[in-house]
Image: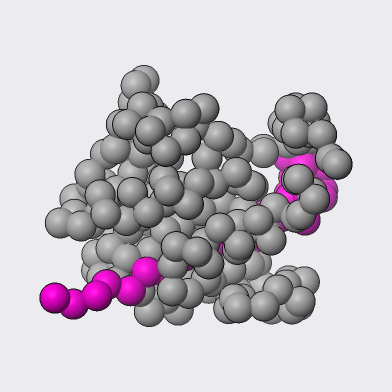
Amino acid sequence: MKILMRSGIILAGGEARRAGGREKYFFSHCGATFISLLVSTLNEIVDEVIIVVRDTDQCHRFSEIAGVRVVPDRHKGRGPVGGIHAGVCEAEGDFLFAVACDMPCVSGDVIDYLFHAAEGFDAAIPRWENGMTEPLHAVYRRQALVRRFAGTEARSMRDLMSGLSVNYVDCDLLRRFDPELLTFTNINNEEDYIRLRAVYPEE
């Protein structure tokens, strides 16, 4: 039986407009930066970690992080879809986990479960009871994305998902690994960060 290779893609190419111009991936949480926490967690689950950034200048900001590849976005202005495309072009894994750089509490157990849930599908995407999904905390089959990007241009995550066979995973099922579902903690702005620091004060 073939052993499937896994890739992790961290999307770090945003403009940081909602964070007061600060780069969120260097925010601190529990004594480490968001990006360091993500890399550390992913290294226990995947075979390679790729960080996608805006441009070649931004690549240098991650030069001190060992064990990752840093690549620039290939299509500026296309948001997360463009970042995922750049990651797919560089990734070697059969499946890849795509995650936003502002999610510092991702659970390795949840990620591992999503990799297994994606087998037999093009993707495994968590879905909340109200129908909202978490496409930037999800696993995708690389070849399915290669085909999708070769077809009609996807300009949004909704467009991208519409062409895939998706296993939508009930978020409540993931509570067995992460009871409070902290894995979906997303720091969109300074207010979110203040709330995170209140819950997890720095030692």
Inspect this view and state whether residue 109 appears.
Answer: yes
Q: Residue at x 36, y 20 (%)?
A: 130
Judge whether residue 146 is colored magenta: no
Q: Residue 36 in the image: x percent, y percent?
A: 69, 61
Q: Residue at x 67, y 38 (%)?
A: 188
Q: In the image, is residue 103 above or below residue 45?
A: above
Q: In the image, is residue 124 above or below residue 143?
A: above
Q: Residue 35 in the image: x percent, y percent?
A: 67, 59
Q: Residue 200 in the image: x percent, y percent?
A: 75, 33
Give 44 or 9, whichever is nearer the viewer.
44
**Residue 177: which quarter of the image?**
top left
The quarter in which the N terminus is drawn is bottom left
Q: Residue 100 in the image: x percent, y percent?
A: 56, 51
Report the side of 173 relative to 97 (left or right): left
Q: Residue at x 70, y 53 (%)?
A: 34
**Residue 203: which quarter of the image?**
top right
Q: Which residues are magenta?
A: 1-27
Report the side of 96 relative to 188 (left or right): left
Judge whether residue 15 is colored magenta: yes
Q: In the image, is residue 94 above or below residue 34?
A: below
Report the side of 182 relative to 63 (left or right): left
